[in-house]
Image (cartoon, rainbow, N blue to C red):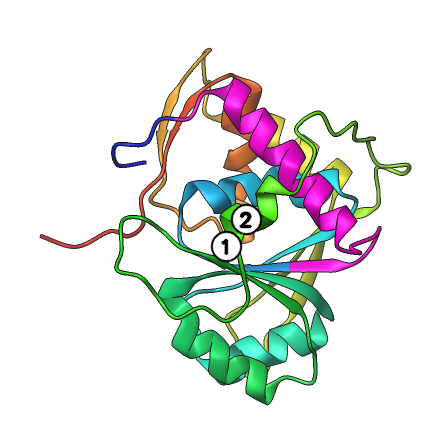
Amino acid sequence: YGSEHITYEQFDINVRRLASALIETGIKKGDTVSVMAPNIPAFLEANFAVPMAGAVLNALNIRLDSRAIAFNLDHGECDLLLTDTGFSETIEEALKLSSRNPLVVDIQDSNIPEGERLGLDYSDFVSRGDPKFAWNPPEDEWDALALNYTSGTTGDPKGVVLSHRGAYLNSLGNLIAWQMTGKPIYLWTLPMFHCNGWCFPWSIAALGGTQVCLRGVNPI
């Protein structure tokens, strides 16, 4: 990501710490952790850490307005919100409109100017976690892994639940359909919030591939 390079060894530590920190702060099985962020490393970490903690990952569409975001927070019963400071204005208004009162953790991307802080600092939050956190796989493969919503173009957004089994099968299905070989290089232009990036966060990791994060795509 830019000049930042993260090995899978370090990524594993980051993910275990985040999962551990989520649990230490009170997140338990079935709780909803929402993420409002572009395709940055912290979002990639959340794709692994939230399920690792037994929680449900709710990736928010960064293109929606505060009213739609508030609806998703309410309907998805958000318990903790990881949010990039680049969207602090939208999130601040959404939290005012929402009936939920989630713990807010701010992600400050070093590639953008300092944004308004609404809660805890992400780096400080993750540093609380155990780098050797011993996580357990889901008790039931049909347990919810993620909660995704439509964009709400014809009314309120509609929610769809993705199970651990579904994510696993789709992740490996990507490898077969795309005939991927070991250690591919994947450029993140598809939003990670869209259908969990079609499960490519997990697909590429399964082959030990390089994931090139990209905050945004600007037309020439």
Residue located farthest toward the top when viewing the structure as drawn: 182
Three-letter amino acid code at the position of disc 1: Phe
Residue 124 at x, y percent in the picture: 55, 48
Three-letter amino acid code at the position of disc 2: Asp
User: Is 138 displayed left or right of 61 in the figure?
Assistant: right
User: Is 191 displayed left or right of 73 in the figure?
Assistant: left
Sequence-wise, the earlier of marks 2 and 1 is 2
User: Which range is magenta?
Assistant: 6-33
Label 1 Cα crowd, 10 Å radius (few <14 / some 14-19 / many 20+)? many
User: Is 92 displayed left or right of 144 in the figure?
Assistant: left
The residue tagged with tag 1: helix, strand or loop?
Answer: loop
Q: Which residue is mark 1?
A: 193
- Give the camera-side residue of 36 and 168: 36
Residue 137: numbered disc: none
Quadrant occupied by the N terminus: top left
Residue 23 at x, y percent in the picture: 77, 48
Residue 85 at x, y percent in the picture: 40, 64
Q: Which residue is drawn at the image coordinates 18% and 54% (left, top)?
A: 218
Find residue 104 and report its image quarter.
bottom right
Image position of 215 with respect to 174: above or below: below
Q: Which residue is drawn at the image coordinates 83% and 30% (left, top)?
A: 136
Tag in front: 2 or 1: 2
- Give the camera-side residue of 205 and 173: 205
The residue tagged with tag 2: helix, strand or loop?
Answer: helix
Label the magenta part by its dominant secondary structure: helix
Q: Is residue 57 visible?
A: yes
Label 2 Cα crowd, 10 Å radius (few <14 / some 14-19 / many 20+)? few
- Separation (CA) of disc 2 from disc 1: 24 Å
Q: Which residue is drawn at the image coordinates 79% and 27% (left, top)?
A: 134
Q: Please say whether residue 9 is one of the residues in the magenta stretch.
A: yes
Residue 124: numbered disc: 2
